[in-house]
Image (tube, rainbow, N blue to C red):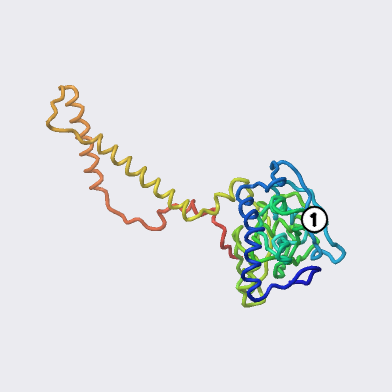
Amino acid sequence: MQGTPGAIKASGSYSSSYISNAVSSDYSRGFVQNENEGAGVGRGRRAAQDETTIKVYANCLRPDIEYKTLSITYETTCREVVQNLLNKYRMRHRDPRLFYMTMEVTVRRANVRTILPLDEDARPAVLQSCHPRGDSRFSLQTRRGGLVKIYDSALMSGSKYKSLLVSEQTTVDELIQMLLSCYSSKERVEQFSLYEVCEGEEYQRKLHPDDSPLKVTQRWTSADRHLRIRRNPDYNPHRRKSMWASDSSISMAMSRLNLHGDHRSINQQSRIVVPHTTQLPPLQLSRVQQQQQQQQQQQQQQQQLPSTPISSKHVSTAAYNDYENYLFI
């Protein structure tokens, strides 16, 4: 904990008894309750569409930046605040997931400052309204990440590759969006895909949109692999969602097919079975006999046909034409 004027370090029984009581009474009583209810305490209770200002200390972005005052609503999240700061300073190559916000709260009775990391979905305006003006302070912090090299000649013909610092939580789609932002491109993320290319084994693998490029590169054991972005030649706005089917959606579809098949077989049986105890008129009885004779003839014809086992060549492979996860050069 940094030494600030009027701040003391908590130690011994003083920190375990007095400070914990002060934090629980002054902070969590209003902090947790108002975060769940989405409203402030006292004069901090306002409508969601109202705006307020917060001061964010963002020295981690650039040494010459001390803080930035932003006008936000009570529904603005920390994720949106981080993206707003990056946009204001035109840092298109910076990964938003590398940053997170902290809230420094002053407990006046204990004369101690507590630093709390905030979740991406936390709302700074609501949290600020839980404390008197000046008792809370927001700061921008950085997470550890790694460098990823992407060959991006598909985006810019004159470019060979671009190296970006990303976090382990950054997905393929988010990385593609960062590359598009670097070139001020208005194209959609779905028009591109990221591939893991192995030159030694002469193959390439299309990464899933939710894969982590940094984790993929961390598993590499040889230097003949790289990431390359490519255009989707058969791009369709509605195709990408149906291409990657989850296990739950597949099992649900199979259960529906089984139910449909059972229902159809029950209907066929109900049409074929005729009770012998029921006395039908002569006209209806003759029709039933004709149907039974036709069914017997069909069964005899099927028995005369040679039985041939179903092989793999009889199975249609049209359902696998869209699977592009593994492509060989």
**Element under label 1?**
strand
Furthest residue in direction right, as rendered: 64
Q: With respect to residue 187, does 6 lie above or below?
A: below
Q: Is residue 38 left or right of residue 299?
A: right
Q: Position of residue 177 (x, y in %)?
A: 71, 55
| Other-residue count near label 1 (Cα within 10 Å), few / some / many at <14 / 14–19 / ≥20 | some
> Which residue is rendered at x = 84% and y = 62% of the image?
66
Q: Is residue 182 visible?
A: no
Q: How many marks?
A: 1
100, 14: nearer the viewer: 14
Q: With respect to residue 284, does 219 lie above or below?
A: below
Look at mark 1 in the image and give the residue it sits on.
Answer: 55
Q: With respect to residue 307, does 149 lie above or below?
A: below
Q: Is residue 257 left or right of residue 161?
A: left
> Which residue is rendered at x = 72% and y = 45% of the image?
43
Q: Position of residue 124 (x, y in %)?
A: 71, 53
Q: Position of residue 203 (x, y in %)?
A: 60, 68
The quadrant of the rendering that contains the N terminus is bottom right
Q: With respect to residue 91, does 34 lie above or below?
A: above
The quadrant of the rendering that contains the C terminus is bottom right
Identified by mark 1, the residue type is Lys
Q: Position of residue 104 (x, y in %)?
A: 73, 62
Q: Is residue 171 left or right of residue 108?
A: left
62, 150: nearer the viewer: 62
77, 249: nearer the viewer: 77
